Amino acid sequence: MSINTSPVLSVVIVSYNAKAFLELCLWSVQRAMKGAEVEVLLIDNASVDGTLDMVSDKFDFVTIVPNTTNLGFGRANNKALAHAQGRWVLLLNPDTIIPEDTFDQLLQHFHLFPNSGGLGVKMIDGAGRFLPESKRGLPTLWRSFGRLSALSRFFPNNHVLSGYYANEVQELELRAVDVLSGAFMAFPKEGQHGLNAFNERFFMYGEDIELSFCLQQKYGNNYYNGLLSIIHFKGESTPLSKKMIYHFYDAMWIFYDLHLKKSHNTLTSLVVKMAVKTIICFAGLLLPYRQWSERRKKKLSLDISKVLVCTNTIFDTHGLKKHYGDCEIIQIKSDDLDSFVSDGADYHVLFDLQSISAKEVITVIDTFKSRFVFGFISPQSDFVLFSSGGNYKGRVLYF
């Protein structure tokens, strides 16, 4: 295994049963390294899907730190920080794809803004839709109420009710924001017990909000860079369950208890705690319906008009025919997609990741968002992954 002895940047990835997504993530990380002083640490939370064998076989530059149990997101990241040697740390989800210039832009940002805290980027899902959690305001009581009650949708310009997603910041801006996403968050490393350590009261959600708050208190500004885009498929390691619902909403109470409670009276704090418990109970009652809805969404129709394979070489389509049968498969350049948009036919657009750059893929799906069903062919050409964050979420077809 090749290990960089003096990395400038430590990339930390916590994985849990996301093998196919992690493979594409590490493929993009490998291309982004380009000889830079970068180390990659994988903390695996006891996956049982063959993750460790895959990483060992295909990505010898990755330092693996295996766990025997699922430690959750925060504890696992803190374990990684004990090993990280870089001056800066990038927390990266396993269900992401980053462009080739990511690390260059990241390090350039900290050179231009040496006193900045965290750095986040524009995230889009597998269908090209912008993910609003890329940039957020602090979750005050009114902002949280606006989001949970959906009032923020009706009053998008009301900063009190809609400030949860920092609507005053445009998608393509470089601007200071309060809260960044833990799916992609870079910050200066100060040691395991410094401000960059997660609070382990959080198990799965809310850690990034709390860390963003602490970084902001220390450095003054966190930044959102809307000029740098990544794909975040979203939610592939966290299946919908009662445990997930509990941790998601309980994180609201933990953050309130840590940072907001002291500014409110006892009655307000009691109301907040009861409100969180009520939301958890209500969400639990709706769980069967949501699970049924998710199962429907995961049904990927292969009964389509054509399959368009975006490639810069000649691609062997034999493996695809196993799933698509007699469906016509056409090999095209990504620039040719314009000619297929207006005919109204149902197409799958598959990206040959062996020959196309991650940056080009991200640009294409951002341009043609939701007009096609996008698939991502692994560089080894042994599977194609579909994950739009919507109707075709989380499906892997093996050749």
Image (tube, rainbow, N blue to C red):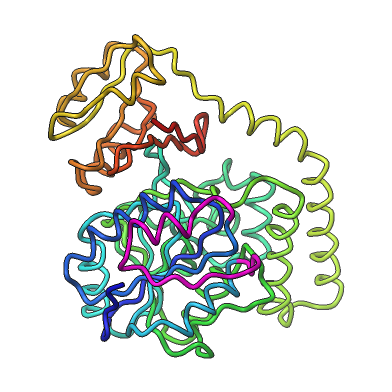
Say left or right for 335 vs 216.
left
In this view, 338 is above or below 189: above
The quarter of the picture where the C terminus appears is top left
Residue 156 on image: x %, y %: 52, 47
Say left or right for 186 vs 237.
left
Q: Nearer the viewer, residue 152 or 71?
A: 71
Residue drawn at 53 percent across, 65 percent down: 44
Q: Nearer the viewer, residue 351 or 113?
A: 351
Figure disc tally: 0
Residue drawn at 66 percent across, 30 percent down: 293
Residue 136 on image: x %, y %: 49, 61
Residue 60 in the magenta stretch? The answer is yes
Q: Nearer the viewer, residue 375 or 224?
A: 375
In this view, 117 is above or below 394: below
Say left or right for 124 vs 47.
left
Q: Nearer the viewer, residue 307 or 263?
A: 307
Residue 158 on image: x %, y %: 54, 53
The quarter of the picture where the N terminus appears is bottom left
Region rendered in magenta? 48-72
Residue 276 in the magenta stretch? The answer is no
Say left or right for 33 vs 298.
left
Residue drawn at 42 percent across, 57 percent down: 168
